[in-house]
Amino acid sequence: MQIKSLLSNAKVILAAASMFVTLNSFSQKSKVETRSEVEYKQLHSSSFNDKNNKLFADGIRLKMDMSALDEAEASRNFDASGIPADELYGGIWSNSFVNIYGALNDVPASYKVDLSNFTIPHEGYMTSNFGTRRRRYHYGVDLKVQVGDTIYAAFDGKIRVTQYERRGYGKYVVIRHPNGLETVYGHLSKFLVKENDYVKSGQPVGLGGNTGRSTGPHLHFETRFLGRPINPNFIIDFDNKVCHRDEYVINSNSFRKTNSSSSVVAGRAGSNSNYKSSKSSSNKYVDGDVKYHRIRKGDTLGVIAKRYGVSVKHLCKVNKISTKTTLRVGKSLRVS
């Protein structure tokens, strides 16, 4: 009887032990499966010291994948809840006026700006250029508009300012773009956006007008970087309503003033081709040494060559392409 009782107790102990092992294994398995994934590359190496590597996971040293940051910087995308180029602008975001960046010290020596999704703010021809104007300096270009004409955002961006300045811009809009630029649209008759709105390239932002210090309906358009004005002609071909190329590198030369008068004489098609920079200018786009054509639907090498009076062989040589290369709409092709 005693032996029978011992056997019975042993069975109970074995059953309990078996249940404990099973539960413990299930618990361990669940714990492993529900661990959050670590989004860094694991380096099984002791070549990094503790000072430079402070991230650990289960005793394995981690190093941030810097290539992911490089890709993010290259794309310069942002969502509607973010602020474009926020790090570049030192976290400064104000709805007060155009240039609020006087205190910025960390200005890069050069900066590459992506121009690939440009839209001309208005199709009107140039009536006044960047340059000296009597006792004042004109920091933008003026495009002919009629009161009520639609004005479009030049690039994707976020509306930083919608204000009224009676003795200056009149009703004006400032947009901060992910590519690092800010653009200004002055003398509007009506706002179609609000401060902190997110806009896409080509989206209406206002209606043309004659408000502020203005002698007739026109759009005053500026391109600025960290608050400093850049001659829009360095970036945009206003004759063809496109950018000179898909990228523009900003450096110290970008901020120089020209000795040219802001006055222009409109051609029959509204051309501003008579614009000439000062003789000391070293910007090849304004000087006319290099010209680019933005490829449109239906363009061929033969059509483009004929338009600019060059040969197909010349186009292939300066662009390092062949006659069989596919021309992609929206891309730039060098023509001189």
Image (cartoon, grey):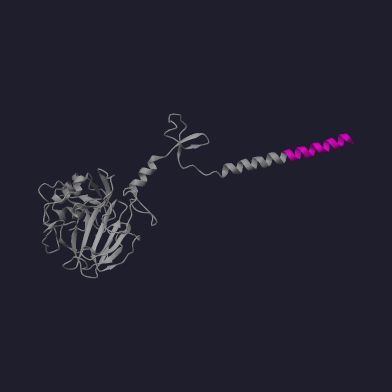
Q: Is residue 54 above or below residue 274?
A: above
Q: Nearer the viewer, residue 56 or 12?
A: 56
Q: Relative to 185, is 158 on the left or the right?
A: right
Quadrant assignment, res 198: bottom left
Quadrant assignment, res 83: bottom left
Total labels drawn:
0
Residue 81 point in image, percent of width and height: 40, 56
Residue 314 point in image, percent of width and height: 16, 47
From this viewpoint, is residue 121 visible? no
Residue 210 point in image, percent of width and height: 20, 68
From this viewpoint, is residue 41 visible? yes
Q: Nearer the viewer, residue 46 or 299?
A: 46
Q: Relative to 15, is 58 on the left or the right?
A: left
Residue 324 point in image, percent of width and height: 25, 48
Q: Relative to 138, is 37 on the left or the right?
A: right
Q: Is residue 53 magenta?
A: no
Q: Relative to 91, is 248 on the left or the right?
A: left
State the residue at coordinates (36%, 45%).
71
Q: Nearer the viewer, residue 237 or 131?
A: 131
Q: Residue furthest front?
A: 103
Q: Is residue 87 above or below residue 191?
A: above
State the residue at coordinates (75%, 40%).
15
Q: Is residue 4 magenta?
A: yes
Q: Nearer the viewer, residue 191 or 178?
A: 191
Q: Mostly what secondary structure, the magenta segment? A: helix
Q: Residue furthest top?
A: 47
**What are the residue bounds of the magenta stretch?**
1-17
Q: Is residue 62 above or below residue 147?
A: above
Quarter of the image containing the N terminus? top right
Q: Residue furthest right?
A: 1
